[in-house]
Amino acid sequence: MSGRVGDLSPKQAEALEEFRERIQDVLPLLPAQHDHFLLRWLRARNFNVNKSEAMLRKHLDFRKHMKADTITTEWQPPEVIEKYLSGGMCGFDREGSPIWWDVIGPVDPKGLFLSASKQDFIKSKIRDCEMLQKECDLQSERLGRHVEAITMIYDCEGLGLKHLWKPAIETYGEILTMFEDNYPEGLKRLFVIKAPKLFPVAYNLVKHFLSEITRNKIIVLGANWQEVLLNYIDPEQLPAAYGGKLTDPDGDSRCRTKSIQPCRQPSLEISGQKAGQQAAQKKTHGSIEYQLGWIPRQMWFLHQHLYAFVNKIKIQILSSFDPCLGLQGVNVFVCQTNHWVETAEQIAGQYILVMVPYWRGGLMHRISV
């Protein structure tokens, strides 16, 4: 028996009745009280009522601590996450379940982690889960039948060593554990498409965070991935870039305004200066205003990276260079600051300074100089 409504064995039905009785004191606090919802917790723990109860009560603590009931309306992710973390909901599969897309290749984990906190990433994923659950509820009303799980498509094109950066893997593991502990049975199936040779390595780093039930729902597709997707998704619900017919009103085949938002690498171009030369150039790029201050006379290296610290701005130059050759091609990451450093004189002529205004939540720009 599947352990779902209408397909319960006598023992499963008995476990459901006992489970409901045990949690009467917290039932009103749950996001749903129907059998479909309660059975998700029982299936996650193989209908062990004691373990299911402990899991559910721990989830209520989680909801209170993370303010999950209001996170979709009262919390907004930092702009850098909304703008540069790719993915989103787009379309429905042939059974009416929402489809969630993750597009991994364009994501720059280190850049994102330098500009937003781990807590922000975790909260953004909680927000996604809550939004998807609301969408499932709406679909249930539209279709007149229960929809409780999503189809997920994981586009691995461009997966590289940068995505295996240890802090990113650790945070991703925490997010996967959060999914398993607090949104059980929310995944119907997960398709991995365009997986490179590195994919098995990446998967081995995170699979231990997943339950056996979840691992069994992961399907790695080969070269015929478009054909397989069309077996599960109507062409009208599949973006044209992935073999379907769905586009944005402006013809965008990736449906970026329909919630798929592949990361765009932010970049600004500014001219290089010679070592020791003084410069104080204010520039604008769209709504961003910034300033180039002094070229460094003294620098120090740590783990092959050059660091300079100016007030609360941290500048990390990610490639070694000879100051006498100028700065062409060097990447600079500017993290958030709470106030302006208004003139280059404030840093005594010792460091390069690139200035940006403080934006809500902080914002990181990658600047090629």
Image (cartoon, rainbow, N blue to C red):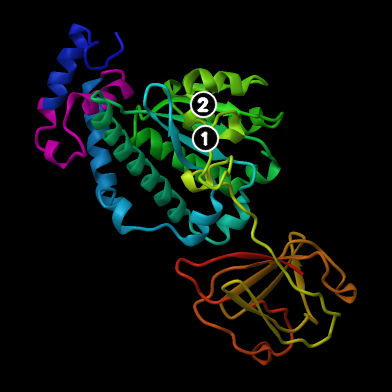
Q: Which label belongs to residue 179?
A: none
Q: Estimate the x, y position of residue 51 in percent, counting from the top left.
A: 26, 26
Q: Which residues are magenta?
A: 21-47
Vertical placement of residue 158 versus 13, above or below? below
Residue situated in front as seen by the camera: 158 or 173 = 158
Q: Estimate the x, y position of residue 314 in percent, counting from the top left.
A: 62, 71
Contact check, label 1 and label 2, Cβ < 8 Å:
yes
The residue that label 1 is drawn on is 246
- The residue under the point 65% across, 29% down is 195
> The disc labelled 2 sits on which kind of residue?
Pro
> The disc labelled 1 sits on which kind of residue?
Leu
Q: Estimate the x, y position of residue 71 in percent, counting from the top left.
A: 31, 52
Q: Secondary structure at mark 2?
A: helix
Vertical placement of residue 70 versus 271, above or below? above
**Relative to 191, 284 lies left or right:** right
Q: Estimate the x, y position of residue 12 in percent, counting from the top left.
A: 21, 13
Q: Secondary structure at mark 1?
A: loop
Q: Does the image show residue 24?
A: yes
Pick whichever of labels 1 and 2 is earlier in the sequence: 2
- The residue under the point 65% across, 55% down is 265
The residue that label 2 is drawn on is 235
Label 1 to label 2, Cα distance in Å? 7 Å
Quadrant occupied by the N terminus: top left
Residue situated in front as seen by the camera: 191 or 330 = 191
Residue 42 belongs to magenta span? yes
- The residue under the point 77% across, 69% down is 369
Vertical placement of residue 79 versus 253, above or below? below
